[in-house]
Every structure is written in C-alpha cells, then in structure tokens.
Image (cartoon, rainbow, N blue to C red):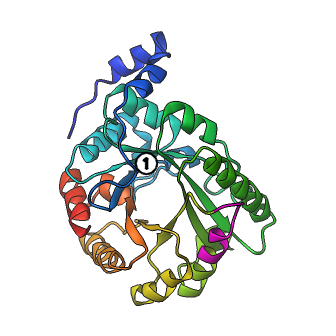
Amino acid sequence: MTRVDLSDLVRIRARHPEAVAEAAARRRRRPLVGPSGRLMIVAADHPARGALAVGDQRYAMANRLGLLERLCTALGRPGVDGVLATADILEDLLLLGALDDKVVMGSMNRGGLAGAAFELDDRFTGHRAEDLARLGFDAGKLLLRIDYDDPGSLATLHSTARAIDEMAAHRLPVFVEPFICRRVDGVLRNDLSAEAVTRSMAIASGLAGTSAYTWLKIPVTENPDDMARVMETSTLPAVLLGGDVGDTAAGQAAAYEKWRGALQLPTVQGLVVGRSLLYPVDGDVSAAVDTAVGLL
C-alpha cells in the first residue's frame, strides 16, 4: 500500500491553506475520455453522508489515513482514469500530488445523510459548479433518489435540474446517478428492477435546459440480462455504478461478471467503483483494481 505522511499533510493544512489552490493550479489536466475511449473512476464520496461501513466493519472508511493510502494505491495502477470524492478528500489528494493526469470528479449533493428522516431532501452541500470550475476539476457527480411517497424528492429533482444547468453553463460534465427508491421498515432501499432503473433513467435524462453535458451513472439491474433493454432508454453516455458486492470472494467475482456483460452495451462508457475496490475481501487493493480495469 502507498504510504502517506499524515503529520506533513496536517502541517500544510494548518500553516498553508493556500497550498490547496496552488496545487490545483499546478495540476496536469487531461481530457475526460482518453485514448481508450473508456473511463475507470474510483469513488470515495461515501464518508460525507456518514456512510462509513464496509461489510461488517462499521467505521472502516472513517480512517482517513487508511482511505488516502488506498486511494493513492488505486490511482497509481495502470488504466485508472481518476477519482470521485468530496472536497476534503480531493484536496488531500491534491496536496499529496496524486491527481496529475487524472480525471477529478467532485461530489455535489451530500445533504441527504444516510438514515436521516430528511435523506431524500438531498441538498447540494458539496461542490458547486463554480467551485469545480475555479479549481480546474473535470466533472461533477450528483445523486438523484426518487421516492414517490416522499415530498423531499421533489426538492431534490428541482435542485438537480438547476445544478445540471449550472454545470452546462461552465461546460463541465455532470454524472447523474438516479434511483427509484422506497422505505422498507424505515430504511431507504433502491429498486434495482429493470422497470425502476428504466424509469429513473428516463426522468434523469430529461432534466434541465440541456442534456449536452449530462452523463448517467447506472447500477446493474437485479437480472443482468435486462441491461440491454434498460440501456435503450437514453442516448446519454453512461458509466456503471459498482455498488455493494458483499463480503465474500464469490460475491466480488459475481459482480465482476455482471459488469463485464453490461460493459459491452453501446452507451456504457466505463465504471465508477468505490468500496469494493478500495476495501476488497482479500485486502489486495492493487489486484482488485487491476481486475476491474481488465474488464474494460
């Protein structure tokens, strides 16, 4: 695992906060889609929602030093195009010099805290379009969960549309991750049926005054055989959402096979995967990342 000097990072943050903007200005940039025509993005925006668990380890992602070391290891592997995270994590990675020649994707709405009564009134408390433009970042990502029984979804729909407009005004791509969901015994559950994923894609594709800069971030359906029909819903470019693959080697292998099949579809341009690569069952981050890159 790549080693990170935490004390040095804290010293820079405490004494030289301007170093973040300076590191952003120095960063070597690249096109969103490189020569391969595919995207492999590692996601680490979970902690800002209070979603810290990995398998049966309730606070695995709360260890920031461990998370940064895992991210630096993943970003150093061949074929990894970039990272999706909130401002605090991206700025740590900037100061560590880990974002040169990488796609940097800022996470935009984090107000819908995991398990909160207001989870679906998902306010944009993360990156704004102007922040991403100022820092020279390459894209944004937002989560759009729709529960027909929760009025908070309407507020999120409205603010999502306006955020897409603002990103387009800056000519910045925005990755929209839509779900139809519902509460089961008070816990929010995403519906991964073909019908629900199709409906969520149709809704997300039509938001805002333009879709020119909109990408979709889509889960593999419960039945992977449905994906070809589901992906016919939109012409917007899409990436696959990795999601939870369980805490066994068999579960991880099954997820890889589902991704492999869906990656053959014409609108699917890549993968955005987080915990299953950063915290693999066998602990080997490099091997997990290399396997995922191989699917592309």
Residue range corresponding to the magenta coloring: 201-210
State the image quarter where residue 209 is shown. bottom right
Q: Position of residue 272 (x, y in %)?
A: 40, 59
Taking 15 as reference, is 228 above or below it?
below
Q: Residue at x 31, y 53 (%)?
A: 34
Relative to the observer, which residue lies in front, 130 or 242?
A: 130
Residue 28 placement (x, y as % from top left): 34, 33
Which quadrant, please, contains the N terminus?
A: top left
The image quarter containing residue 198 is: bottom right
**At x 49% / y 70%, what residue is drawn?**
218
Which one is nearer the viewer's eye here, 22 or 256?
A: 22
The stretch drawn in magenta includes residue 74: no
> In the figure, 89 relative to 167: above or below?
above
Which amino acid type corresponds to the residue marked 1 in the rendered image? Ala
Q: Is residue 22 left or right of residue 261?
A: right
Per the image, the residue denoted by label 1 is 44
The image position of residue 167, as x and y in percent, is 62, 48
> Along the horizontal axis of the image, is 246 left or right of 147?
left
Tell me if residue 174 comes above or below residue 237 in the rendering. Answer: above
Query: Can you name the residue that lies furthest to the right here?
Result: 151
Q: Is residue 3 left or right of residue 192?
A: left
Q: Residue 209 magenta-drawn?
A: yes
Q: Is residue 176 above or below residue 202?
A: above
Residue 254 visible from this viewpoint:
yes
* Residue 76 position within the rendered picture, expressed as x and y whole percent measured from the top left: 23, 43
Q: Is residue 109 visible?
A: no
Secondary structure found at label 1? loop
